[in-house]
Amino acid sequence: MTAIPANAGFGADDPATSAPAAVESPATLTPEEQQLSDVWSRPRGLWGWLTTTNHKHIGLYFIFTAFGFFLLAGCLALLIAFSWPCRTTRSWGQTFTTKSSRPTAAR
């Protein structure tokens, strides 16, 4: 039984289907390609973050925002739960249901 090379039958000798030898750096771009790269690249910083149109970035921002609000809601729920044993004043429901505030029937 003979061993089959890993790249056999997949166009290893064909330059059209083989991987490029090196990725072009900005120094090897023509002026027209450099201008296109500048126009189509995402701006850096906060402005680029807010104005992106890449659906993958927008999806990640949506997920992180939802998770952030989920954590905020959990913290607020804990704050409410821990404040119940420490309550010293009457709540609104107790204020309006005491005997002195109930209407009396005319006799």
Image: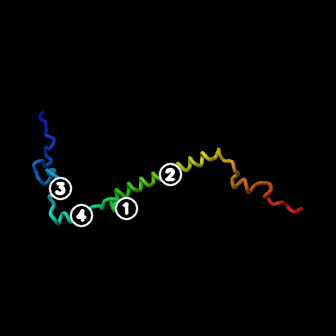
Where's residue 6, x and y in %?
16, 41
Q: Are marks 4 and 1 in contact (CB under 8 Å)?
A: no
- Residue that badge 2 annotates: 72
Where's residue 92, x and y in %?
69, 55
Kind of element beneath mark 4: helix
How many marks do you count on the picture? 4
Q: Earlier in the sequence, mark 1 or mark 2?
A: 1
Kind of element beneath mark 1: helix
Pick whichever, 97 or 26, lies toward us: 26
Q: Quadrant of the N terminus?
A: top left
Q: Amino acid at mark 3?
A: Ser
Residues at marks 1 and 3, CA–CA distance in whole angstroms: 27 Å
Where's residue 13, x and y in %?
10, 48
- Give the quarter of the image for residue 98: bottom right
- Residue that badge 1 annotates: 50
Residues at marks 1 and 2, CA–CA distance in whole angstroms: 22 Å
- Residue that badge 3 annotates: 25
Could you tell whether 67 is left or right of 36 in the image? Answer: right
Q: Earlier in the sequence, mark 2 or mark 4?
A: 4
Residues at marks 4 and 3, CA–CA distance in whole angstroms: 13 Å
Q: Amino acid at mark 2?
A: Leu
Q: Earlier in the sequence, mark 4 or mark 1?
A: 4
Residues at marks 2 and 4, CA–CA distance in whole angstroms: 39 Å
- Residue that badge 4 annotates: 38
